[in-house]
Amino acid sequence: MINSHAAYRALTSRDPRFDGIFFVGVTSTGVYCRPICPVKTPLQKNCRFFENAFAAEKALFRPCLRCRPELAPGHAPIDNSNRVAHLITRRIDEGVIDEGAGLEEIAAEFGISSRQLRRIVQKELGVSPIELMQTRRLLLAKQLLTETKLPVTEIAFASGFSSLRRFNDAFGTQYRMPPTHLRKRAAENHETIDAGRTSTLRLSYRPPYDWEEILKFLGARMIRGVELVTADSYARTVRLGKRTGWIRVAHAPEKRGLVVEFTHTLAPVLPALLGRLRNLFDLTARPDLIAAHLMKDKRLKKSVTKNPGLRVPGAFDSFEMAIRAILGQQITVKAATTIAGRFAEAFGERIRTPFPELTRLSPLAARVAKASVGDIAKLGIVRTRAASILALARAFQAGSLRLDEGTCPEADTAQLTALPGIGQWTAHYIAMRASRWPDAFPKEDVAVRNSLGRVSTKQAEKISQAWRPWRSYAVMHLWKSPRSRSSSDR
């Protein structure tokens, strides 16, 4: 049963994480839409909410011609988990779609023609895939020219262009100036920062932003050798495809953003890197909408008033985060962190960095999948948990499990709980962070139930209905409660 008040709040936010979770029928027009439809939000009294398109059509609503409900996650012929625009954008960022190869390969992967793919993207975003690709690449190039001293040639390739000539032509056509002219203007304004083998970029957020709390959360769960959290920064080793390096993130409150220092070895995969950091630090959240809703509940009002910028930390690497969640089952945060460090030492490759604390790359699923239960158990991990880790690694390696922003959270939790040793608590915790599900609720969590007055799991689920669709954020506030005491990691 859909909570109509929660669904309407999700509708007003137009958060793509709710796409495919429900549909809205508008009684004044007789049309039903996805929650990300660009039309003006209808009045709540004119909205009816449905779990699927079939129910909406049975109620005699017609599909919207703008948002096209048939393209919602789980409904589109090309969309197994992500909505079309999200998929295409991510593929562009990851370099899967390039100027030379065109769209034939990616269209074939989804079982449609490139013509169909172009038509879908045009309907969704109002531009062709090539125009979308061009705009994203030029905007990134513009930021790199302004904020770094990377050579123009490196910026061209880092932005996804196949040659310097193509980059110069596209930049000149779009901005009516050569790239070097923008670089010169930025230098005159002293905006560029360069530290030799690294550069910095700024990632913006909507204030308020509780930087101290997110560092505290990540610091308690820091994987030794892979991550380093200090009083004012987060650093880690990075592997994206064949590229390796390190990043360090600091807060720039006066600029309402985070400053990311990255090694130039990561420049070719910069779009994918920045996307992962946006997820990790929850930079796309709407704290105003979330806080306004949660503080209506007297159980949360004090915490929300005191911590209006509290975010839900995501995952830089979904496999890494899922392993960490399994390691944290039924033991303390501190104990799980110790074991996670051993795991990285055993299965992560060595890397050299300027930081003595950063010595390992995060373990790959392919490497862990080749291990035995005994190999994992000898690190001090109980055998049942070792078997869960092995099953998870093999599912990732086979491609049958993919946890990421935009995937269907219900499908993710169902796949996770089908694996040995993974229950609802672990699945919801992973969905909350790796799948970026804003409405995840690990109702079995002891700390959550203690914060609510030592209620039962069933009672916790009932109470949580008032917080939808932002239950993940409510959980973060409950974990801060003085009454929050748990024997398990979270």
Image (cartoon, grey):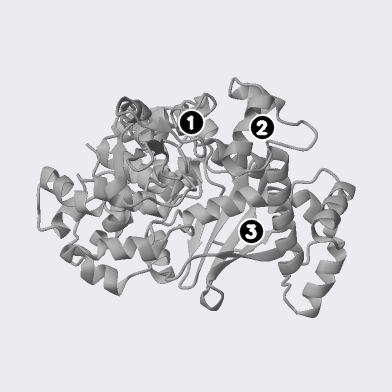
Q: Nearer the viewer, residue 230 or 152?
A: 152
Residue at mark 2 to residue at mark 3: CA–CA distance: 43 Å
Mark number for residue 118? Answer: 2
Mark 2 / mark 3, whichever is N-terminal: 2
Mark number for residue 396? Answer: 1
* Residue 489 visible in the shown view: no
178 w.r.t. 364: above or below: below
Residue at (31%, 28%) from the top-left corner?
A: 55
| Structural crowding at the residue carrying mark 1, measured as other residues with C-alpha within 10 Å and reported as few (<14), some (14–19) or many (≥20) | some
At label 2, the amino acid type is Arg
Residue 178 position, x and y percent, is 87, 61
237 w.r.t. 132: above or below: below
Q: Which residue is mark 3?
A: 353
Residue at mark 1 to residue at mark 2: CA–CA distance: 30 Å
At label 3, the amino acid type is Thr
Label 3 sits on a secondary structure element that is loop
Residue 414 position, x and y percent, is 33, 30
| Image quadrant where residue 141 sits | bottom right
| Image quadrant where residue 50 sits | top left
Does residue 261 appear left or right of residue 392 in this picture?
A: right
Q: How many marks?
A: 3
Q: Residue furthest right?
A: 165
Residue at (64%, 58%) from the top-left corner?
A: 353
